Amino acid sequence: MLMELPDEIEQNDSGMESLTASKDDTPERRPEDIFITPVVVGTSPSADTQPSLTLKEFDDEPDETFSERLWGLTEMFPVCVRNGTYTVTTKTWSGVKNLYQLSRSVMWVVASSSVILFAPVIFEVERAQVEDMQKSQQKQVLLGTNAAMSGPAPGMPPMPR
């Protein structure tokens, strides 16, 4: 049993499509291929059958990316929500960038100040240690190895071990 299709679903091939088709259209993606095709559901020709309409699907179409899906979801929200989200996002991003730049500047000031303030102290402590070592060596040379090991000179505090 054949069913008559409405005029808007019927496709007639007059042969003129090949003259007007662009060179970029492939046989799988021609605009005339995207139409509704009737599928008759039923087991016998005498059964009361209703046509169900299906769309042709193409397997070679690329899937949506995550960003494309998110962008598509924005259409379901009102403009005020989209604008508010945009504002919050941009303000948050600029705040993070400014905080990062501020932390870099603060770390530079702290590091350079600590070098400038503590370098002289470190140099003086090192110089004092070198002087003590030189005195100890000089004492060892003058008095011998036992004198250097016997203890500190008078007026000097004992060295920690």
Image (tube, helix red, strand yellow):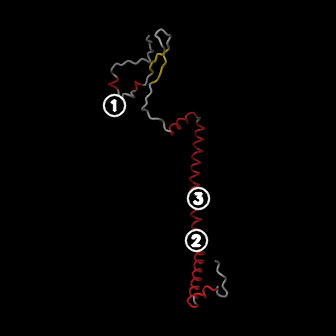
Image location (x, y in percent) of residue 132: 59, 83
Image location (x, y in percent) of residue 55: 46, 24
Task: Name above or below for residue 12 compared with residue 160.
Answer: above
Q: Which residue type carries mark 2?
A: Ile
In this rendered view, identify the residue nearer to me: 59 or 82.
Answer: 59
Check disc 3 and report the residue beneath it. Answer: 103
* Sooner in the amino-acid sequence: mark 1 or mark 2: 1
Q: Which residue type carries mark 3?
A: Ser
Q: Which mark is residue 110?
A: none
Check disc 1 and report the residue beneath it. Answer: 23
* Sooner in the amino-acid sequence: mark 3 or mark 1: 1
Which secondary structure, mark 1? Answer: loop
Name the residue rendered at 58%, 39% in the picture. 82
Circles 1, 2 touching at the beta carbon (< 8 Å)? no
Which secondary structure, mark 3? Answer: helix
Name the residue rendered at 59%, 65% in the picture. 110
In this rendered view, identify the residue nearer to me: 47 or 26.
Answer: 47
Image location (x, y in percent) of residue 46: 47, 8
Check disc 2 and report the residue beneath it. Answer: 116
Real-space CA distance between mark 3 and mark 2, rounded to the nearest whole angstrom: 20 Å
- Pick out the residue farthest to the bottom: 142
In this rendered view, identify the residue nearer to me: 154 or 11.
Answer: 154
Which secondary structure, mark 2? Answer: helix
Real-space CA distance between mark 3 and mark 1, rounded to the nearest whole angstrom: 58 Å
Q: Quadrant of residue 99?
A: bottom right
Name the residue rendered at 55%, 89% in the picture. 141
Label 1 neighbour load within 10 Å: few <14, some 14-19, many 20+: few
Q: Which residue type carries mark 1?
A: Lys
* Sooner in the amino-acid sequence: mark 3 or mark 2: 3
